[in-house]
DNA sequence: ATGATCTGTGTAAAGGTTTACATCATCTCC
DNA sequence: GGAGATGATGTAAACCTTTACACAGATCAT
């Protein structure tokens, strides 16, 4: 209507011929306002095109309607779908999403801590496996927070994610069912909780299959493509080859597959490979990658739902919230190559 | 320090024994404050751990330090890297990023319009090819805005992206140089500016190569994998096959490649394929996809830089800001199959 | 010595909301 | 009919900043 500055609650009050308090009540607690008055107010709102000034509201309430989402790398193929779940859930409750990526630099994390301190975000979603605020992490007064996708190592922060142990177990079980016994685990890590849990699933599966611990092949890795390729090279140097590679995530699996192909091997005829996550690329690899699917959107939705509960005063849950991962069978797994059957 | 509510400017003033006005000035216009005073204030800030309350600041200034980024689909493989560029540039200027995804639903777009009206964002980055606010788009009073990745169809909004014509031209030129003359363009669209420009590049390239207009094969498409596969099926029905497919983007190219492989053809021996964008998958396809790379991070950075200029009062540029796309040669292109040489 | 200029600081208003408290009219019950 | 409860609305304070304006003291030119 007017070309000048946006309508305030006072404009509405004037047109509806009531006080600003009544307008505010008509909006937030309509049951406390007479029907006739509410009608007038609503008309006035329609006429003016009034929208509550979020800044003023947040200032008065001492709490914003923004949620800060911090990830080490926005480009992580796992991130975007989780973000979709987070965003949908937040928006449908009137919250907005603020994003930050730290690139694993504690200095950058600190800048986002400032965001929190200056009241710009009411809650925090952590995509990172650790608190990203450097040495101030401990003393920092954090708002209600929820970790997602990867449990937070150092913070006693509620976590929503997939059951890593169960997921890994499904992958080993498939390999075992196909006849594999020499299964390498690529991407072990003591500092990344998600990874060490996947390792647990691996061990549990091989325990059940009766494969003794000394026959297991474990290689470290940080979950990058490069780490997969490197681990493979180490194995070829040592000359202790498995018949199957169970990789801690899809990136690692991609690295392993690239390495195997570079050496002229066929997957799955010569070696089987499994991943974890089911990133978009997994479908398009040749062969397509058998992996464990993270229900990413659902994780995001559940995490945000939990955070919103915390914001409205609920107690943090005692346990982690673990969703069930599905085994996605594609073409990178078959029975072991003949030379492994001989033994 | 204190476990209670965060320090305000008044706490700082009390400790430094000055007025709150002086504290504010010491922070924002230090040159207007005596050295000795500034020192006291800085100490007091250190003691209290004071951070400016962004809400109060924005309210007073009538302008927030948030930029709203709206995309139809956060999961778009092109999006995340652009976001990295946007975020880095914004953060280094004290701005934060608010994100919204509309899933092409004008209703959802409207909800973000409310965000803008309520002063929560000072500026707008549009990842969409059109204004996402439905029929209110025209009357809406938008804050300074910049379109990115795809020119905005209906809004006179400054645009930062890649030179689509030049990029497409590089792709055709490669195909022509390899000896192709029958080159199909898959993914034409009159409503998507980026696509029609790529078509222009295609036409320009074939003009230069002396391929008459009636020998060109043009198929519509909306840029999804499915659209690529569908277009391919149409061609096989018509039985007017080209020797090469120049696809409007990588997704389309992936669709075409899937279709060709399903029919048992070899790429590039039987058909060459090019894409556009260089999404992460492009590397991992078999064969890997020859395509045009979008400098995504650079685009994001440039777009945000422009937006920040607009926010500080600069005039919108007369022209679009176009970055140069690079041709990325991989393995999906070779000379035409023999049967095409015969004619 | 007088007035003008400059420097540094304080006072107070404004920005738009929400909400405790006060007020007033109406209704209920004896 | 009057006391008290109930319901609807208004008044004003508070949230925390920034900044125009006022003021005081020092410096300078005459």
Image: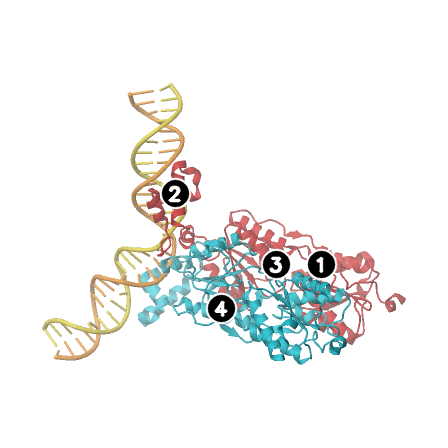
Chain colours: A red, B cyan, C yellow, D orange
Separation of residues labelled 3 and 2 (CA atoms): 40 Å
Q: Are marks 1 and 3 on the same chain?
A: yes
Disc 4 to disc 2: CB gap under 8 Å: no
> Which comes before the other along the chain, label 3 or label 2?
2
Chain designation of label 2: A
Chain designation of label 3: A
Separation of residues labelled 1 and 3 (CA atoms): 16 Å
- Write down the quadrant of residue A184 in the picture: bottom right
Residue that mark 3 sits on? A81
Chain designation of label 1: A
Provide the secondary structure element on which disc 4 rests. Answer: strand
**Residue nearer the viewer, A68 or A319:** A68
Q: Are marks 4 and 2 on the same chain?
A: no
Residue that mark 4 sits on? B159
Residue that mark 2 sits on? A41
Provide the secondary structure element on which disc 2 rests. Answer: helix
Left or right of residue B261, residue B173 in this image: left
Which circle marks residue A292 in the picture? 1
In the image, residue A198 lies at what x, y percent?
71, 60
**In this view, the mark in front (2 or 1):** 2
Separation of residues labelled 4 and 3 (CA atoms): 27 Å
**In this view, the mark in front (4 or 2):** 4
Q: Quadrant of the N terminus of chain B?
A: bottom left
Provide the secondary structure element on which disc 3 rests. Answer: helix
In the image, residue A82 lies at what x, y percent?
60, 57
> Which comes before the other along the chain, label 1 or label 3?
3
In the image, residue A247 lies at what x, y percent?
73, 65
């Amino acid at each position: 209507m007017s070309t000048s500055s946006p309508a305030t609650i006072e404009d509405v009050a004037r047109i509806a011929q009531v006080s600003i308090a009544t307008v505010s009540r008509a909006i937030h607690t309509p049951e406390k306002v007479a029907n006739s008055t509410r009608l007038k107010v609503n008309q006035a709102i329609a006429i003016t095109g009034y929208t509550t000034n979020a800044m003023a509201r947040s200032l008065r309430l001492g709490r914003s309607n923004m949620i800060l989402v911090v990830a080490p790398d926005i480009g992580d193929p796992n991130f975007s779908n989780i973000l979709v779940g987070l965003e949908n859930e937040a928006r449908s409750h009137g919250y907005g999403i603020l994003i930050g990526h730290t690139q694993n630099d504690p200095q950058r994390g600190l800048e986002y801590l400032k965001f929190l301190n200056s009241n710009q975000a009411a809650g925090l979603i952590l995509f990172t496996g650790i608190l990203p605020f450097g040495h101030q992490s401990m003393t920092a007064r954090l708002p209600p927070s929820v970790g997602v996708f990867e449990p937070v190592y150092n913070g006693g922060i509620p976590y929503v994610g997939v059951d890593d142990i169960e997921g890994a177990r499904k992958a080993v079980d498939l390999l075992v069912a196909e006849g594999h016994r020499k299964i390498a685990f690529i991407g072990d890590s003591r500092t990344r909780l998600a990874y060490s849990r996947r390792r647990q699933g691996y061990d549990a599966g091989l325990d059940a299959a009766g494969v003794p611990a000394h026959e297991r092949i474990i290689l470290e890795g940080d979950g990058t493509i490069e780490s997969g390729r490197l681990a493979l090279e180490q194995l070829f140097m040592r000359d202790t080859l498995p018949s199957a590679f169970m990789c801690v995530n899809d990136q690692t699996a991609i690295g392993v597959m690239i390495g195997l192909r570079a050496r002229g091997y066929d997957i799955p005829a010569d070696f089987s490979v499994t991943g974890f996550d089911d990133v978009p690329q997994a479908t398009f690899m040749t062969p397509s990658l058998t992996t464990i699917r993270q229900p990413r959107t659902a994780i995001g939705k559940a995490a945000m739902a939990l955070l919103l509960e915390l914001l409205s005063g609920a107690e943090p849950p005692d346990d982690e919230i673990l969703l069930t991962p599905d085994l996605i069978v594609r073409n990178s797994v078959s029975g072991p190559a003949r030379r492994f059957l001989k033994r």
